[in-house]
Amino acid sequence: MRIVLVGAPGAGKGTQAKLLLDRIDGPHISSGEILRSEVVKGTEVGMKAKEFMDRGQLVPDSVLIDAMRARLREQDCSRGFLLDGFPRTVPQAEALAEVLDELSTELDAVVTISVPEDSLVQRLSGRRTCRDCGALFHVVFNPPAAEGNCDRCGGELYQRDDDRAETIRERLAVYRRDTKPLLQWYGERGCLTEVDGVGDQSAILGRILASVEARA
Ligand code: AMP
């Protein structure tokens, strides 16, 4: 299966991708995680990306697309993958279509997870991420057993720089302006399926699986 998850920041793409991973023969590829790891490593891509990420803006295609192309060409993607956070713009979707074409394959589904904007702000502002394993928590909705530590690996939980109030507003504006047109683009190509992203995690997972199976 080759699946793309699209949704506003805070819609639950990362959480659902981690749950879906058991059902897919292939890796979870998060463009945000790839970029954050480039930032930590201090690479040229990371240094260029950081200034945009800190402001809640999209990293330019010239910085990101080559890295994503290379990732999709790796051996572990040959049977499937779950793309989370890429593509986010129509030019990125065109670049993705090109790579898949070169690899003689295509997407099985593009799933958009919809959540009202008020809930997105609540979710993002309380989100905490594990520095070591990337597990996601929320100070109110999904708190860790011991404050500040990951339930899974004991790693330190931190608040992403871009999960602060001013940056959240910018990220949501960027989503409305740049990513919403992508939904229309995929809709016109008949591969978009929309899932209600409100409710508990397993209910949302069930909706995603049902919508993907309905397309198979
Ligand atoms: P995420 O973890 O998906 O919320 O992404 C965090 C940040 O990384 C975004 O706010 C962007 O600055 C950058 N980013 C991630 N994916 C993309 C993408 N497909 N295009 C441009 N920038 C991206």
Image: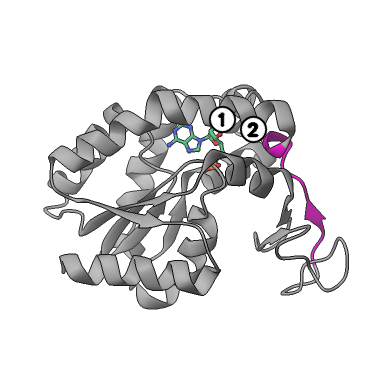
Q: Secondary structure at mark 1?
A: helix
**Amino acid at pointer 1:** Arg
Label 1–label 2 contact, CB within 8 A:
yes
Q: How is the image coloured?
A: one colour
User: Residue 80: horizontal and vertical position, in percent?
Assistant: 28, 65
Inter-mark Cα distance, 1 to 2: 5 Å
Q: Is residue 34 above or below residue 54?
A: below
Res 211 quadrant in image: bottom left
User: Residue 59: horizontal and vertical position, in percent?
Assistant: 50, 26
Q: Nearer the viewer, residue 50 or 138?
A: 138
Report which residue position mark 1 lands on: 171
Q: Magenta segment: does it hold 159?
A: yes
**Amino acid at pointer 2:** Ile
In magenta, the rendered stretch is: 155-163
- Check the image and name the residue furthest to the right: 147
Q: Tell me the residue at 17%/51% (across/down).
A: 103
- Badge 2: how crowded within 10 Å, few (<14), some, or many (20+)? many
Q: Nearer the viewer, residue 10 or 155?
A: 10
Q: Is residue 145 above or below residue 14?
A: below
Can see residue 123? yes
Report which residue position mark 2 lands on: 168
Q: Tell me the residue at 72%/58% (across/down).
A: 138
Q: Nearer the viewer, residue 164 or 71?
A: 164
